Amino acid sequence: LGIIRKSKSTQVVTKFLNKYKYKGNPADFEGARIFSRNRDVDEYNVSKLKSLDGKMVTYKTKFVGEEFYINNLKKNLVIKDEIALKKGSLVMTRVNNKSEGYINGTMGYVIAITNNKLKIRTLDGKTILVSPHVFEYLDGSGKLVAAAKNFPITLAWAITIQKSQGSSLDSALIDLNRLWLPGQAYTALSRLKSPNGLHILSWDKKSIIAD
């Protein structure tokens, strides 16, 4: 990670990434997929959600504050304006709530849906309850100027490199092709708690970019 953060691809990096290249069928992978582009993420998540049986439930994010501040909040908000779920959806929590047993990056399947709670079975077999969360936006003086409220989750069959920032994942299938910004490869790879959970879908030397 240190080499990738500071320089372009080297023999050490090449050996490492090839070692963890995923050899199975991508369709059978259980866990998050990390892509660089929103379009790839949205298409994959929508297709997986549609493939589930059962009724789809939609929760709209509620915003308060002046339009200018709400727009600024949305630029950095880790959840969407609208969250669509079905029982069986693979999701990721996007905040730390240790009292309820989850952190930013905890993944699991939705096993029950109500208006005020989501019951989720995490990938390591625990059952957690997730309530709506208020995301706050403060101005330069620390004054609360905008807020957004919804369940602090995203569909997690796939996420972008940008949206993965701050999360800690046990396992992920990462596509390191067609990256265009310095640090993207480092950000994606450093989401993993351990290389044991790292699976590289594909990678290109041109994608290892340092500033």
Image (cartoon, rainbow, N blue to C red):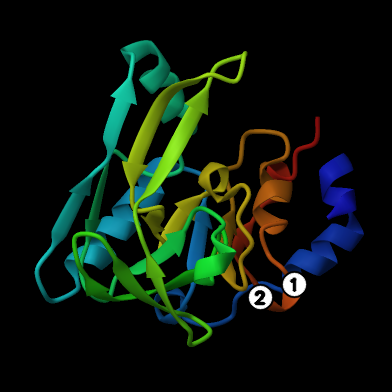
Residue 8 visible, this orientation: no
Is residue 142 shown left or right of residue 52? right
Q: Position of residue 164 (x, y in %)?
A: 56, 50
Q: Which residue is mark 2?
A: 197
Q: What is the total number of numbered labels drawn onto the structure image? A: 2
Amino acid beneath label 1: Ser
For the point 40% across and 24% down, the residue is 146
Q: Residue furthest bottom?
A: 125
Q: Residues within 10 Å of mark 1 (few under 14, many from 20)?
A: few
Q: Position of residue 158 (x, y in %)?
A: 43, 59
Please tell me which residue lies in front, 209 or 1: 1
| Quarter that holds the N terminus | bottom right
Please tell me which residue lies in front, 65 or 83: 65
Q: Residue furthest left?
A: 55
Q: Position of residue 113 (x, y in %)?
A: 22, 69
Please tell me which residue lies in front, 207 or 45: 45
Q: Callout 1: helix, strand or loop? A: loop
Q: Callout 2: helix, strand or loop? A: helix
Amino acid beneath label 2: Gly
Q: Are marks 2 and 1 in contact (CB under 8 Å)?
A: yes
Q: Which mark is residue 194?
A: 1
Q: Quadrant of residue 64?
A: top left
Residue 99 visible, this orientation: yes
Please tell me which residue lies in front, 164 or 58: 58
